[in-house]
Amino acid sequence: MNELQKRIVAEGRVLPGDIIKVDGFMNHRVDVKLMRILAEEFKAHYAGREITKIMTVEASGIPLATIAADVFDVPLVFAKKAKSDNIEGGLIRSEIFSYTYKKKVDLIVSAEWLSPDDKVLIVDDFMANGEAMRGLVDIISQVGAQLVGVAIAIEKGFQGGGDRLRAQGIDVYSLAVIEHAEPGNIVFRE
Amino acid sequence: MNELQKRIVAEGRVLPGDIIKVDGFMNHRVDVKLMRILAEEFKAHYAGREITKIMTVEASGIPLATIAADVFDVPLVFAKKAKSDNIEGGLIRSEIFSYTYKKKVDLIVSAEWLSPDDKVLIVDDFMANGEAMRGLVDIISQVGAQLVGVAIAIEKGFQGGGDRLRAQGIDVYSLAVIEHAEPGNIVFRE
């Protein structure tokens, strides 16, 4: 088991509805030292690939993506979830279904901050159905930028989002792919 | 002028409604190197004070707060804006008026991740009316933790939020206090 998998086993809690709660180190209280260890693993995996930007979506993926941007020494761009009063021009949008909010939301990125020359690594804390990731991939494709890969801390393998992206030929790298989770028994993909 | 003030003058844009747009380096595309310079300035200002936790509120303050947690070598806790389906117990709440959403929202922090022993530095990218900061100060006070200070990148001095907190004896440290802003003319407090 790697560092993240050990922490999930030691501190994660499995709640009804396939929720794996890791808010003591990942997405409420954040262990920034652990984020650096994870970002260094991303760096090792994508070694030799040119990367000009880290992208994520607000809010819980931002700490890991910030440290990843620090480690890769490139800027971070985080997509926003559209608010009703956001009617500015120059925005790139992708509609996704948010399982958190149980409705459709638009991911938006200002066209100013993503260019066709960019080589983008997407980073997020969690992937389940992969809707947010699908939206970011769509935005990168609309701009004509190059997608280098999708780097995830925790993937809920049993929900299929990561495998759908892999089937499209995307280099999805997840540090902990959970295949099965019940209280006291979390099984990772080999 | 310090590093941040130079960047605001060079790249910031003043929009109608007292909006100072710095989304090219602060809160959409993020210059993580700049975040580290700002966090080091916070570290210098609060030198000698014991700090056990950095706190912020989702979403745009998270990159700066993450780097601050890295520089201070402590965990980050970010408050969430309450969603309707969030009915868990063990939550500390503070109601604020959000000028972004133009309605009341609850800031929430899980009681698990903040203790009476904590010595907390609040960090955020922006302060205007100071409602979000008032909410975080209230949460820290409800827990009985100690507030060390409020460290802000950009304070809109003309909106009074920072000065209201200073009047309560809080050590508010802002790297750029904007007293007046119109296109082509941004005036900082001395």
Image: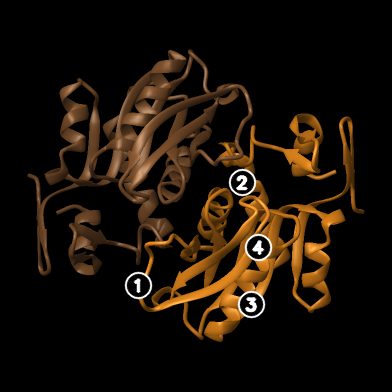
Chain colours: A brown, B orange
Q: Do callouts 4 and 2 point to residues on the same chain?
A: yes
CA gap, disc 3 and disc 2: 22 Å
In the rendered image, residues at marks 4 and 1 fall on the same chain: yes
Q: Quadrant of residue B137?
A: bottom right
How far apart are the two marked residues, 1 and 2, measured between alpha carbons? 34 Å
Q: Earlier in the sequence, mark 1 or mark 3?
A: 1
Q: Nearer the viewer, mark 1 or mark 3?
A: 1
User: Are callouts 3 and 2 both on one chain?
Assistant: yes
The answer to whether the residues at label 4 and label 3 have Cβ atoms under 8 Å apart is no
Residue visible at 37% across and 23% down in the picture: A138
Q: Amino acid at mark 1?
A: Glu
Q: In the rendered structure, find residue B88 and report the number of the disc placed on it.
A: 1
The x and y percentages for residue B179 are: 89, 50
Is B158 in front, or is B115?
B158
First reached walking from the N terminus: tag 4 or tag 2: 2
Residue A41 has which mark? none
Mark 4 residue element: strand
